[in-house]
Image (spheres, rainbow, N blue to C red):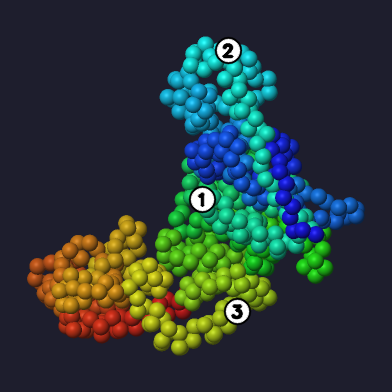
């Protein structure tokens, strides 16, 4: 049997399918991403009888119900959602959801004289040659005869017969052919997943998460649309709390749900530390509840697949939706989320830029939720999640094949009664003396300021409440919160004037330090030996020229917390390479000590 069959339908039939929910648009409540001009161009193609591509549908595999009957779910629109939504908006007059979750019409106008389409605008509304909204023409009961008379009275350059001919051509758009590729309902779920992921939609490669969300949203029986909206609205509210009122106004049914009450707290909450996408939320909820790391498994389970018999069973669908819903509600729970954010802050993470690996954050929250589910002691949860997050960043644990590592780690945390035991096993294998003595120093030999290893160093400084380089009272955290910049211990201009012209040389992260701007300006392009001499002089009672440090004890403490070698007092350009090597060792020592104290 073929994996698919190709058929033709028309616009009228397609609109009917959507209205009767024979075919479900999984993204119907999500923001419409096409620009209005693309809707206009689609109508122009249909009017001129140009091909507009295929839509692809797939019906759920047959699942056997408890009474022995076979369940045939509604068809999922795998590809073509934007085109179908555009047709519904322009011809059927349906509203679309904007990125801020308000609803609006995309109104397409038509000029019968020139036979051109345009997005409605104020100028068109004043121009008698335009039909300002083509959806009016497609409505049942439209008075074609009366319209033609009125239009031709106002536009003498077109005859009644010619206008009638053009209107017939316009309304015949509803009979325009659209190709439909129907994937066989007997297809194995893995094959359908692969087909789905290979399809391009609006230039963006579709993912396992997209497919899983489609599976969720089309299952009315087990609260799929409710789960979908909870995920989607949470992820938008966490970034833009201002859209709360739009959700309440435009989705009254969801606004009355218990799920909505569980995310209402976001309207008055702001964080830029962890802002999960729907893919992140789905992955965390699935991994923690199902103890699996591969989202393709979620698609299979939501389809009712029994992994042992390779059959599809309704009871598996029901159980999977129940578990996923519970996982989503645990993710969006105010207490859980805020406590996780506090754990991140307690590890020195104060904004999203400090942890470049979203997967490291995702697994840290997955781990937090799992340990909460297992009723692990709260203080132990804090320690384990902190250490695991930092270790994940250090070893780039989830950068290569995150799904397989998620799967590996969550299963092992699940079976260890004491989670710290698995942390200790990881440390023995991944964070041995060889790591601290060789791998970490080598990783610090880079000019990339966004390096996770430099961020780890900064996290350790925040954790220790360190003062900025050569600052008496301003902390590193305060500088970061005020968007302060890192500066060079060996000033860039000084190094350039002494032959270090390659930015990979003077921009080494071992040459970076958070410094007050006034301190940096006072240092100018002097060598460390020169500007440290000025600080020594002010400690001995002379005029304050650089910062506010006025005693040697404070200066020595400041140098230590910023991992600056004691030999800095005598350093000039010829000492630069030795300085970098020595400072890398000091940074490693600081990160190592910080990790041990987490």
Residue 204: percent from the left, percent from the top?
Answer: 53, 55
Say which of 112 and 513 sits in front: 112
Instruction: Report if residue 585 is visible in the image.
Output: yes
**Is 26 placed left or right of 112 in the picture?**
right
**Quarter of the figure with residue 528:** bottom left
Quadrant holding the N terminus: bottom right
Between the residue at mark 1 and the residue at mark 3, the CA separation in whole angstroms equals 32 Å
- Residue at left offset 45%, top offset 63%: 345
Element under disc 1: loop
**Quarter of the figure with residue 549:** bottom left
Mark 3 and mark 1 in contact (Cβ < 8 Å)?
Answer: no
The residue tagged 3 is 422
The numbered dot on residue 229 is: none
Between the residue at mark 3 and the residue at mark 2, the CA separation in whole angstroms equals 82 Å
The residue tagged 1 is 238
Question: Which residue in the rendered view is the most extreme toward the left?
Answer: 542
The residue tagged 2 is 149
**Quarter of the figure with residue 489:** bottom left
Residue 406: percent from the left, percent from the top?
Answer: 60, 70
- Residue at left offset 39%, top offset 71%: 451
Mark 1 and mark 2 in contact (Cβ < 8 Å)?
Answer: no
Q: Earlier in the sequence, mark 3 or mark 2?
A: 2
Between the residue at mark 2 and the residue at mark 1, the CA separation in whole angstroms equals 54 Å
Question: Which residue in the rendered view is the most extreme toward the right?
Answer: 67
């Amino acid at each position: 049997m073929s994996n698919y069959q190709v058929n033709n339908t028309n616009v009228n039939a397609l609109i009917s399918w959507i209205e009767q929910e024979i075919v479900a648009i999984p993204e119907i409540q999500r923001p419409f991403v096409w620009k209005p001009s693309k809707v206009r161009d689609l109508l122009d193609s249909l009017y001129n009888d140009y091909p507009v591509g295929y839509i692809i549908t797939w019906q759920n595999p047959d699942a056997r119900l408890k009474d022995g009957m076979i369940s045939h779910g509604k068809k999922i629109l795998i590809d073509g959602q934007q085109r179908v939504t555009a047709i519904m908006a322009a011809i059927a007059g349906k509203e679309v959801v904007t990125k801020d979750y308000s609803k609006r019409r995309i109104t397409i106008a038509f000029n019968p004289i020139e036979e051109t389409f345009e997005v409605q605008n104020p100028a068109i509304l004043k121009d008698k040659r335009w039909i300002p909204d083509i959806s009016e023409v497609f409505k049942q009961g439209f008075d074609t005869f009366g319209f033609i008379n009125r239009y031709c009275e106002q536009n003498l350059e077109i005859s009644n017969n010619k206008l009638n001919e053009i209107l017939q051509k316009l309304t015949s758009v509803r009979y325009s052919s659209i190709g439909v590729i129907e994937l066989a309902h007997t297809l194995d779920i893995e094959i359908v997943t692969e087909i789905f992921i290979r399809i391009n939609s609006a230039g963006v490669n579709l993912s396992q998460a997209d497919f899983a969300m489609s599976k969720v949203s089309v299952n009315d029986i087990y609260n799929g649309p409710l789960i979908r909206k909870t995920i989607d609205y949470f992820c938008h509210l966490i970034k833009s709390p201002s859209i709360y009122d739009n959700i309440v106004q435009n989705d009254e049914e969801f606004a009355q749900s218990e799920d909505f009450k569980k995310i209402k707290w976001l309207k008055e909450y702001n964080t830029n530390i962890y802002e999960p996408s729907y893919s992140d939320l789905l992955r965390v909820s699935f991994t923690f509840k199902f103890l699996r790391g591969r989202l393709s498994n979620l698609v299979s389970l939501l389809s009712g697949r029994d992994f042992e018999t390779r059959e599809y069973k309704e009871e598996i669908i029901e159980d999977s939706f129940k578990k996923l819903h519970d996982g989503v509600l645990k993710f969006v729970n105010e207490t859980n989320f805020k406590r996780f954010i506090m754990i991140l802050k307690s590890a020195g993470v104060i904004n999203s830029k400090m942890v470049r690996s979203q997967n490291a954050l995702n697994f840290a929250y997955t781990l937090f939720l799992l340990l909460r589910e297992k009723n692990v002691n709260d203080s132990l949860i804090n320690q384990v999640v902190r250490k695991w997050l930092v270790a994940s960043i250090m070893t780039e644990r989830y950068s290569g094949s995150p799904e397989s590592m998620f799967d590996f780690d969550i299963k092992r945390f699940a079976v260890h009664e004491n989670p710290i035991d698995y942390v200790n096993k990881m440390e023995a294998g991944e964070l041995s003396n060889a790591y601290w003595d060789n791998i970490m120093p080598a990783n610090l030999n880079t000019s990339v300021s966004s390096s996770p290893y430099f961020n780890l160093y900064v996290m350790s400084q925040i954790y220790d409440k360190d003062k900025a380089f050569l600052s008496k009272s301003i902390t590193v955290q305060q500088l970061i919160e005020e968007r302060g910049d890192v500066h060079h211990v060996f000033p860039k201009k000084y190094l350039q004037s002494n032959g270090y012209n390659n930015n990979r040389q003077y921009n080494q992260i071992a040459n970076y330090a958070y410094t007050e701007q006034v301190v940096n300006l006072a240092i100018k392009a002097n060598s460390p030996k020169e500007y440290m001499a000025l600080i020594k002089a002010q400690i001995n009672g002379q005029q304050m020229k650089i910062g506010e440090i006025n005693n040697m004890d404070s200066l020595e403490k400041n140098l230590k917390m910023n991992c600056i070698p004691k030999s800095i007092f005598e350093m000039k350009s010829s000492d630069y390479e030795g300085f970098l090597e020595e400072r890398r060792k000091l940074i490693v020592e600081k990160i190592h000590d910080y990790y041990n104290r987490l």
